[in-house]
Image (spheres, rainbow, N blue to C red):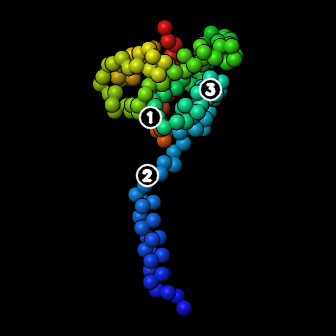
């Protein structure tokens, strides 16, 4: 025979657990590195992030905004540049370039619309963002896809590699 008090106590505890679980936000989205890795346009960027030892950082809590150059953007650099940057002896330079593409906080396109501003990057220098025209520019790069949402921030695809001074 089932003990009703014990059964209803267990059922009540399960119901409370279900309500708590339903109210707890669980992100099923991948982090910035996962999103980039799942997009074949960012394979060079992902390889560079891994070579620079920045993958764990970009998988962290964030939030981060990543201005992500495509493979075509990396291919547009002078011949041999990417291969040279990926060498272990050039890791510091690679880290500097990659962190110049990252802004603390999750900045979406609606927060930029109609504005022109300088924004500090993780690298320490500023990027100039101009969202006053028909396109959004970051220094000399154009945002070709905005607001790719990740669990720990946002990615904006850009058509050029940003180089710090």
Q: Position of residue 150 (x, y in %)?
A: 49, 39
Q: Is residue 131 visible?
A: yes
Instruction: Please identify the quarter of the rendering in which residue 50 is found.
Output: top right
Q: Earlier in the sequence, mark 1 or mark 2?
A: 2
Residue at which label 1 appears: 63
- In the image, what residue occupies the spot 62% across and 23% down? 52
Q: Position of residue 76 (x, y in %)?
A: 59, 15
Seen in the picture, residue 133 relative to 1 is either above or below; the reply is above
Q: Earlier in the sequence, mark 3 or mark 1?
A: 3
- In the image, what residue occupies the spot 52% across and 36% down? 60
Instruction: Please identify the quarter of the rendering in which residue 105 is found.
Output: top left
Q: Position of residue 34 (x, y in %)?
A: 58, 38
Evaluate if marks 1 and 2 touch, with contact meaning CB atoms under 8 Å apart: no
Seen in the picture, residue 86 relative to 50 is either above or below; the reply is above
Residue at which label 3 appears: 53
- In the image, what residue occupies the spot 51% across and 16% down? 162
The local crowd at label 3, few if under 14, some if 14 to 19, many if 20 or more residues have their Cα within 10 Å, is some
**Secondary structure state at the residue bearing disc 3:** loop
* CA separation in Å, label 3 and label 1: 18 Å
Q: In the rendering, which numbered label is found on residue 106?
A: none
Residue at which label 2 appears: 25
- In the image, what residue occupies the spot 42% across and 67% down? 16
């Amino acid at each position: 025979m089932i003990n009703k008090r014990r059964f209803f106590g267990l059922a009540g505890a399960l119901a409370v657990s279900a309500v708590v679980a339903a109210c707890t936000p669980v992100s099923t989205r991948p982090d910035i590195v996962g999103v980039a890795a799942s997009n074949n346009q960012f394979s060079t960027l992902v390889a560079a992030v891994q070579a620079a030892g920045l993958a764990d950082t970009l998988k962290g809590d964030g939030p981060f905004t990543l201005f992500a150059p495509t493979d075509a953007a990396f291919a547009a650099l002078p011949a041999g540049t990417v291969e040279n940057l990926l060498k272990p002896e050039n890791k510091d330079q690679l880290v500097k370039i990659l962190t110049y593409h990252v802004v603390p906080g999750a900045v979406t396109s609606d927060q930029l619309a109609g504005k022109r501003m300088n924004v500090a990057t993780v690298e320490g220098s500023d990027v100039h963002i101009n969202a006053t025209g028909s396109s959004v520019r970051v220094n000399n790069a154009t945002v070709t896809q905005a607001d790719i949402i990740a669990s720990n921030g946002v990615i904006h695809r850009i058509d050029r590699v940003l180089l710090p001074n």
